């Protein structure tokens, strides 16, 4: 029961008590009212005896006072349409605010994700540029080393082609201070180094004839630590991979530092 309904009930009870008290007061006044004393008249004989009594006024009938009307206590009213509409409006407002909050959070999350993606793309782009710059510098350094090696070899009357002091049948290099020679139909060039044993041959499982030039990097111990295709006229990827695999197996004499050289493979279909 609401406070408003309690106030209505108390007011109704107070009204009933007041009216009841008023009724009792009026009823008491009516019962105790003094009837007026009739004055005695002077008898005068005017004619017959029966007519000598004079005129007696008729007693007026007492008119009862109207009963006070009592009002029934006000019944608690049911919720009105306005109250229901107000409640629905409050619920709709709360729901809309919750939806707006979720929408703001979603947009903030999307903005953070886009910012993260932009930062990640910028980082990858910076790494790519740095990697390309490092590769370009490495290629320039390798090209310079090859040019110096070729220049050094030309001082001894050979540019590092397919000839050398080897036996031409895979017997290996028999002492070669200029650092170039041939083995098994293939040739190599590495300034100041000698080939240990024979030059490894690629597998016969190739599909294209031609020449493949492999640039090699040899460490101080004489091991090939990297190999890349830098020339030739073979476009078949499988044949190129066979040349790379064979070049990585080559062994050279020791040196003071890493050096750049080349191995040229000739592929001929039987």
Image: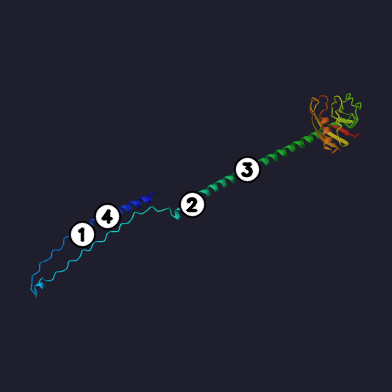
The residue beneath circle 1 is: 30
The label nearer to you, 2 versus 1, is: 1
Considering the numbered disc 1 on the image, is that residue within a helix, a strand or a loop? Answer: helix
Which comes sooner in the sequence, label 2 or label 4?
4
In the picture, the disc for residue 113 is: 3
The label nearer to you, 2 versus 4, is: 4
Q: Are marks 1 and 4 in contact (CB under 8 Å)?
A: no
For the residues marked 3 and 4, what is the alpha-carbon distance in whole angstroms? 80 Å
In the picture, the disc for residue 88 is: 2
The residue beneath circle 4 is: 20
Q: Are marks 2 and 4 in contact (CB under 8 Å)?
A: no
Please report the residue visible at 25 percent of the width from the left and 57 percent of the height from the top: 23
Q: Is residue 21 above or below residue 185?
A: below
Which comes sooner in the sequence, label 2 or label 1?
1
Considering the numbered disc 2 on the image, is that residue within a helix, a strand or a loop? Answer: helix
Which comes sooner in the sequence, label 3 or label 1?
1
């Amino acid at each position: 029961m609401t406070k408003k309904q309690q106030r209505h009930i108390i007011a109704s009870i107070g009204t009933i008590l007041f009216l009841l008290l008023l009724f009792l007061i009026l009823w008491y006044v009516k019962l105790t009212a003094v009837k007026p004393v009739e004055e005695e008249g002077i008898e005068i004989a005017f004619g017959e005896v029966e007519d000598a009594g004079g005129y007696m006024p008729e007693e007026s009938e007492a008119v009862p006072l109207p009963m006070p009307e009592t009002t029934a206590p006000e019944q608690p009213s049911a919720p009105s349409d306005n109250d229901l509409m107000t409640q629905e409006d409050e619920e709709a407002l709360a729901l809309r605010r919750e939806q707006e909050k979720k929408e703001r959070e979603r947009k903030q999350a999307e903005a953070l994700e886009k910012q993260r993606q932009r930062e990640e793309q910028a980082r990858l782009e910076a790494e790519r540029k740095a990697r390309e710059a490092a590769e370009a510098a490495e290629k320039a350094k390798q090209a310079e080393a090859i040019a110096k090696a070729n220049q050094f070899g030309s001082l001894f009357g050979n540019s590092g082609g397919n000839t050398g002091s080897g036996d031409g049948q895979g017997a290996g290099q028999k002492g070669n201070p200029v650092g170039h020679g041939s083995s098994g139909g293939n040739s190599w060039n590495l300034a100041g180094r000698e080939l240990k044993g024979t030059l490894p041959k690629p597998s016969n499982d190739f599909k294209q004839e031609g020449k493949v030039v492999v640039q090699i990097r040899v460490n101080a111990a004489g091991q090939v630590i990297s190999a890349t295709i830098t020339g030739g006229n073979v476009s078949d990827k499988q044949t190129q991979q066979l040349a790379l695999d064979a070049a990585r197996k080559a062994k050279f004499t020791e040196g003071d530092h890493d050096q750049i050289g080349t191995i040229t493979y000739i592929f001929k279909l039987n």
